[in-house]
Image (cartoon, grey):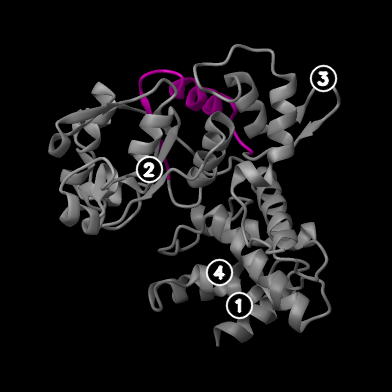
């Protein structure tokens, strides 16, 4: 039997979704698999009346998730906005899995995304043989979502060229996609909507037109508010990734995760946690997602080249690589942080030595 590297959310959490569906007595919008209450519970976690535990997929403001879910029950599309690494894609996938039972209707936005990617294309062999026909039409994920009454996802919307972005205006305002070649149109079935994600620190961002922005309700996903909140996010996701990859290592020690997260938060803020020392801020985002990656790569090193326990030497390479994006500016900021903070912090000598060895 083939083992998948990464299952879709609706596959990975099928048991939780089924448990919610069975106990969900709240009203469901047309074509929704779960009610807005159950979707929110799926995202934020909780214990059902029958004692079944729903694991949290997102750790953060409940109100933000409620606003996102409520938006998708209206005729407005949802735009998840924030800096890289704030779980925009993760939330988008789980919203689609809970609401439509299908998170695969996805358009990945890039500078090369064309109108056909958002609307429809053609099977050119059939087009040449038969001319324009429904059989020759290749529907986009958005067109399929319109026909099936599901959620479509558009990742990195602001990386798509502005004139291509505006293809969405008719779809979102009229809930219709004209196909002039066939003298027909596709009208959206109830349950259809769009979740888009965008980050505001990406190079080459194409601002949304005011006409398109009006079609979206924007929810800004912030970075974790507290150290403990971010530590818990990293611990949960790193443990899940370690199990999925079947790494023969112990779960990462909470203290090591706390050190990584502390470093990221201090460098992001340009200030130590005690507020006493100002720091140079590196050019990278140093997001929660990058902290998870540092822990994950450290687990792989510990599993295959160590004793299976995550140690300072295992996380040093990933840590230095995450911080130093600009070989000149970031290296200066990192060296200063190592000497003035890490070296002097009680119990961090092992991390200082490991990072110093990698940095030199």
SS class of the residue under badge 1?
helix
Specify whether 357 is left or right of 69.
Answer: right
Q: Point out the tag, 1 or 4, that comes first from the N-terminus.
A: 1
Q: Residue 108, how many percent across, how many down? A: 37, 52
The residues colored magenta run 59-82
235 relative position to 152: left or right: right
Closest to the observer, 309 or 161 = 161
Residue 102, image x and y in percent? 53, 39
Mark 2 vs mark 3, foreground winner is 2
Q: Which residue is mark 1?
A: 317
Which is more N-terminal, label 4 or label 2? 2
Using the numbered discs, state the Cα–Cα distance from disc 3 to disc 1 in whole angstroms: 46 Å
| Residue drawn at the location 59% of the way across and 48% of the way down | 8
Task: State the residue position of label 3.
Answer: 49
Instruction: For label 3, count other residues whose C-alpha is less than 10 Å away and answer few (under 14), some (14-19) or many (20+).
Output: few
The residue wearing badge 2 is: 141
Q: Secondary structure at mark 3?
A: loop
For the residues marked 2 and 1, what is the alpha-carbon distance in whole angstroms?
Answer: 39 Å
Magenta includes 78?
yes
Seen at 53% across and 44% down, the residue is 223
Instruction: Please say if the residues under marks 2 and 4 sit with CB atoms less than 8 Å apart.
Output: no
């Amino acid at each position: 039997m083939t083992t998948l590297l990464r299952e879709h959310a609706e596959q990975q959490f099928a048991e939780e979704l089924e448990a919610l569906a069975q106990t969900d007595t709240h009203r469901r919008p047309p074509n929704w698999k779960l009610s807005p209450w159950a979707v929110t519970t799926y995202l934020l976690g909780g214990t059902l009346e029958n004692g079944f535990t729903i694991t949290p997929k997102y750790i953060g403001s409940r109100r933000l998730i409620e606003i996102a879910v409520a938006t998708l029950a209206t005729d407005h599309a949802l735009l998840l906005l924030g800096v890289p690494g704030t779980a925009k894609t993760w939330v988008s996938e789980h919203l689609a899995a809970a609401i439509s039972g299908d998170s695969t209707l996805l358009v990945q936005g890039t500078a090369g995304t064309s109108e056909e990617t958002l609307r429809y294309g053609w099977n050119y062999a059939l087009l040449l043989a038969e001319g324009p026909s429904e059989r020759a039409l290749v529907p986009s994920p958005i067109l399929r979502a319109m026909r099936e009454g599901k959620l479509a996802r558009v990742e990195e919307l602001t990386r798509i060229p502005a004139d291509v972005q505006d293809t969405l205006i008719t779809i979102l305002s009229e809930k219709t996609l004209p196909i002039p070649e066939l003298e027909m149109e596709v009208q959206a079935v109830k349950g259809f909507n769009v979740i888009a994600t965008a980050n505001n620190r990406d190079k080459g961002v194409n601002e949304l037109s005011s006409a398109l922005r009006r079609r979206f309700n924007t929810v800004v996903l912030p970075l974790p508010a507290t150290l403990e909140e971010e530590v818990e996010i990293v611990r949960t996701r790193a443990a899940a990734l370690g199990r999925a990859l079947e790494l023969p290592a112990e779960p990462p020690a909470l203290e090591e995760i706390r050190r990584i997260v502390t470093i990221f938060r201090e460098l992001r803020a340009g200030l130590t946690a005690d507020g006493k020392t100002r720091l140079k801020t590196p050019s990278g985002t140093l997001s929660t997602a990058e902290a998870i990656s540092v822990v994950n790569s450290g687990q792989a090193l510990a599993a295959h080249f160590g004793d299976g326990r995550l140690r300072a030497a295992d996380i040093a390479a990933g840590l230095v690589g995450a911080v130093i994006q600009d070989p000149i500016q970031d290296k200066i900021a990192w060296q200063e942080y190592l000497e003035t903070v890490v070296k002097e912090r009680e119990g961090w000598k092992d991390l200082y030595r490991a990072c110093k060895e990698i940095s030199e």
